[in-house]
Amino acid sequence: MSQRPLAELAIIAGLVAIAALTFLRQIFNDALGYPDADRILMDGVFFRDFLVDLPLLEPYDYIINYFGQYPALSLGYRPPFFPFVEGLFNLVTGVEIWSSRLALFSFALAGSATFYLLLRRTFDWLTAAVATLFLVTTPFVAQYGWYTMAEVPVLSMALVTLYFFQRYMSGGTTLDLALTAAALVLALYTKQTAMVLALWMVLYTLGSLRLLEQLRQRRVWVTVILAIVAVLPLVAVTLWMSDQHMAQSVGVGKAATVQAKLQTDRLLALPEHLYKLHLTPPVLALALLGALWALVRRDRRLWLWLSLILAVYLLFTYIANQNSRYPIFWIPAFCALAAMPVGFARPGTRLRTALVVIAALVGGYQVWQVYAKAPKFATGYDEAAAYVLAHSESPTVFFDGYNNGYFTYFMRAQDPQRSMWVLRGDKLLTSTSIGGRNKLEVHIEDAEGIDQLLDRFGPQFIVVESRNTIKLPAHDVLREHLKASDDYQLRKTIPVDTGEPSTRQPLDDLDLLVYEHVNRPQPTGGVLELRLPVVGQTLQIPLRDIGSR
């Protein structure tokens, strides 16, 4: 084997090692946590349990009852592809956070590999290696490998889509067209924001003066129709549970007007995210250099990445929710632009050698930046779940607090027999859509109502965060009643550590309080009503046979 393939293999192995270094940071630390990541964790566990139980005759009833037992799912609101892969990993290795993070890392490797192959096709292996180095060390991207968020999986599926689409546009094979459609469908089933890829394809073919050429082909229309049919179930579920989706996408009221979309602060929001959050200064500077160099050369390869940047800007400027995570799709485009100077410099010249050295230094700087950022974490929730499972004679536990999803996850992870039900205060005392007071409903307001609820479903233990982080009066009433009433005895206090300074507000400086309901009456059971304002639904779940575990 010649030296060049050996050098490329060594570089590829190094890139994999660097990706592991950045994405798998503290992989065995179960205290790492992030809002929404707990829901996606539980979605993965659901698929694991579904594959074990295979309730093919009554799948809907199974889902409803599972949510009643572990009320921390986001299926329906979020697409299922990444959680399904999580479930496969959990099926093999057990219900572990590190297992779900390995599932996420498999997406990261697939996306990085296709990004490398795409740059290798359009430039050379060294340029591809530099671009991939920039991508896997970008702190904004790497941090989402620490939690089970959908950003890395959807970005990776987007890169797979880009790879096959570029192959199709350059080679024109029907297989590449079909693989493009399949990758796009899976990207949409990973996260709905992947719709930006459809806009990008239109812009790219339009700017390449090939749109009419594509529209004249029967195979294109057949592929488009099949892709639309494939995503119809996702569209149907999204529309069925569309309340929050509509508010976050097109907006409601004044936020949905053209005037609101054209406000200066909205038009400048994404560029501000770009230089403040998405890219480090050296990569942004190299990207500008690469774009200018390509313009001077009139290099047609530039349009592949500029069209993606334009598509991201147009769609995510229009979308009402200006979350910095959503436009993550344009980060690989800027990494590709940043690597272009290496591709333009002639091989063997001092300029190219200097550019490669600069790229290596930038990669090292970004790794340092990745480790300079403290992961978000909150300890104690696994310990609280373990205490309840070890001591409870009741098959129900009541939890009230901000970090309910992780507590629910640990209740399931440490209970292979699935013997207990988790009751959530922010479903039964009050309910809101995505926290705060959005679509607020108050179900119980006084101590008498709280006693009636607890007597009905009979939890022996009530676990609460010592501070009312939900900031609704009913949850203060619960804490005051637990403290004042002789019917409830404090059995354990578990300090919650979030670091110094705190990495997870509003969980800083609080304890988990585990109360026992002494002399509790025999529970009467009944129908468990779970309001889900985020999707405009109310679930009614019969809860029977809850006298003992």
Image: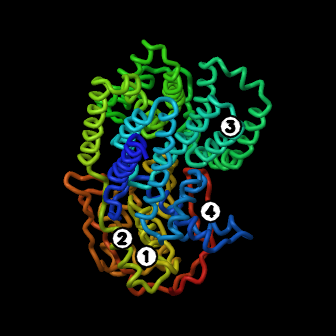
Q: Which disc is residue 382 wearing?
A: 2
| Nearest-to-viewer mark from 3 and 4 | 3
Q: How far apart are marks 4 and 2 (CA)?
A: 27 Å
169, 539: nearer the viewer: 169
Q: How far apart are marks 1 and 3 (CA)?
A: 45 Å
Q: Earlier in the sequence, mark 2 or mark 3?
A: 3
Q: What residue type is labelled 3?
A: Leu
| Nearest-to-viewer mark from 2 and 3 | 3
Residue 12: x and y in percent read 40, 46
Q: How far apart are marks 2 and 3 (CA)?
A: 47 Å
SS type, badge 2:
helix
Callout 3–callout 4 Cβ contact below 8 Å? no
Residue at position x 44%, y 84% in the image: 520
Q: Which of marks 2 and 1 is nearer the N terminus?
A: 2
Q: Distance between the residues labelled 3 and 4?
A: 42 Å
Q: Distance between the residues labelled 4 and 1?
A: 26 Å
Q: Which of marks 4 and 2 is nearer the N terminus?
A: 2
Callout 2–callout 1 Cβ contact below 8 Å? yes
Residue 161: x and y in percent read 58, 39
Q: Name the residue under label 1.
A: 414
Residue at position x 34%, y 59% in the image: 32
Q: Name the residue under label 4.
A: 539
Q: Name the residue under label 3.
A: 177
Q: Which of marks 4 and 1 is nearer the N terminus?
A: 1
Q: What residue type is labelled 1?
A: Gln
Q: Which of marks 1 and 3 is nearer the N terminus?
A: 3
